[in-house]
Amino acid sequence: MEALLPKVRPVPAASERNAADVTALVVAHASVNAEYRHLVLHAPDPAPRAVAGQFFHLECPQTDRDKPFLRRPMSVYKADPRAGQVEFLYKVAGVGTRGLATLACGHTLRMLGPLGIGFSLARDWRGIVVLARGVGLATLAPLAEMAAARGIGVSAVLSARGPAQLMSVARFTQIGARVDTVFDSDGSSAPDNVEAIMRRLVDGGRADAFFTCGSNRLMLLLQRLGRELSVPGQVAMEQQMACGLGMCFCCVRNFKVANAVISRRVCWEGPVFDLDEALSW
Amino acid sequence: MVDLRVKIGALSLANPVMPASGTFADGLAQIVPFERLGALVAKTVTAELRSGNPTPRVAEVEQGMLNSIGIPSKGVAHFIATTLPFYRRFKSPLVVSISAPSADAFADLAAQFNLPGIAAIEANISCPNIEEGGKAFAMSPRATDAVVARLRAVTGMPLWVKLTPNTSDVASVARAAANAGADALVVANTILAMSIDIETFKPRLGNIVGGLSGPAVKPIVVRMTYQCAKAVDIPVIGCGGISSAEDAIEYMLAGASAVQVGTATFLRPQAMLDVIEGIAAFCARKGIAKVSALTGAVGDADMAIDALEAVP
């Protein structure tokens, strides 16, 4: 496995990437629950060729109240080249996403992408485990589909404050994923219980790799388990961005590589990184 | 057909539009054909390895952004081995931006870039000078004179000097740079600024303060470009909040021979191409045959600045 998926993946050069700044058309936009919205866009090539873990840099609309100056990075919830569509699942959390939430069907949105390096799957993996919380679900749902399409079994542990905040379970069950849900409301999302679930999945031979996004606490838990049980992993990270193209060096995070702390750009060397090298954020 | 060519001293550019240092890298080649740019300006390189400032490194404000990146740099060897060969693939002239903490260190660094494939050196003298208690070189005419003279002594290459707007008398700094041998001035770097999150009471940048860029700074830097162009006989390159052809033309009228586009590229990656096309269309509409005719063409001949308004 190590040989098929070397830890230090070469970072693709600009000439090997395919981002473009395109104008997309809103074809659906609806609330999923009290906080999250689901945006579906018809977008020209190369946008629908985005792979799981990649993101777009969105030009969020200005409103009377909000004047977002910079674009906002957002990971792909779904991309379908045949339908020519790109989907996002996002939480309305600030100036940019409040602007985005005003988009109606028929409106257009400029979006730069696909950007960054997505998830990697080794050829000989039989099963992966994804552990997601909050908006991390949006990032990991397309990974589950990519794995299933390659014949890799998916076990998903989905964490939320309560059942009302849980999203995308159908995205996982439709591809035959084994799904565990854990909640703050009944205490099942406590680290001890999540760890016990993960250990059972590893013992059951379902975890050739771990994947996570959306929670520092869960990232640290998976990292510790991965080291103890020799399970490799990948984590998708978020960071404030200005350019999205590796130019401004705003979106750096620190990583531990061979006992040295180095910084990497989330937009260019990421947003998906080796779990073992990640540092707490 | 409008003639878009401009001259920056001995260096000829196919058009007056280039990126501002720090807002440009190989990643943009996916969107912008680099051959269409007047020049390519690389991110500032330092002699030493630098990791940069703590995050958050960016904060958005009304009509602009603050940044405190801290000039992360992989050093000269990496630049020569990796960055330089990449930019040499394009025919547009390459400008190498350098920074150092002392006049001697600046000279040592510049001397390492007397290399084929480099068209000009841009000395970013807006950085802290350890010999002046951390004040930027370009805050004072004396420190500017010292560093530019040292640079002039070690390089025969076109030497552009990038000034800081964080000075009380930018025209005197401009004169000091020109008299010490600069071939052109870049006016200007970002404006020192601060923003606080009133919910958390925390500064919104990890470095507490940072540089303001974007449309918010444009009128200030247009004024500085005007003052500098009046003060010196060498070309001035305008840089500050340019996001459209109209902005670029305004800078040229104020005295700029060329312009740098920075923050606008973050918002619209093809912004520089739009500026080039827009300048050509403007000149065609106005019946202006050569874009260089715009430089300093502001209609101020019968006007004067009131003495009470003239400071700084």
Image (cartoon, coloured by chain):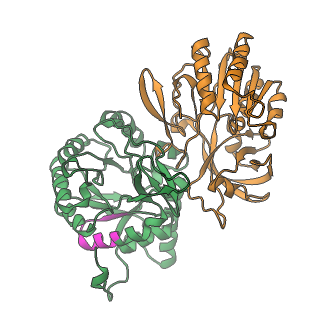
Up/down of B166 relative to B155, above or below: below
Q: Which color has been applied to chain A in this rendered view?
A: orange
- Residue A250 horizontal/vertical position (percent): 48, 45
- Residue B209 horizontal/vertical position (percent): 40, 53
Q: Residue B87: name its quadrant.
A: top left
How many marks the image carries: the answer is 0
Q: Which color has been applied to chain B in this rendered view?
A: green
Q: Residue B290: name its quadrant.
A: bottom left
Question: In this view of the protein, which residue sits in the foreground, B182 or B164?
Answer: B164
Q: Residue A222: name its quadrant.
A: top right
Residue B228 falls within the magenta-colored stretch: yes
Residue located 72% across and 35% down the image? A137
Question: In this view of the protein, which residue sits in the foreground, A98 or A122?
Answer: A98
Up/down of B66 relative to B282, above or below: above
Residues shaded magenta: B224-238
Question: In this view of the protein, which residue sits in the foreground, A257 or A120?
Answer: A257
Residue A241 falls within the magenta-colored stretch: no
- Residue B285 horizontal/vertical position (percent): 52, 76
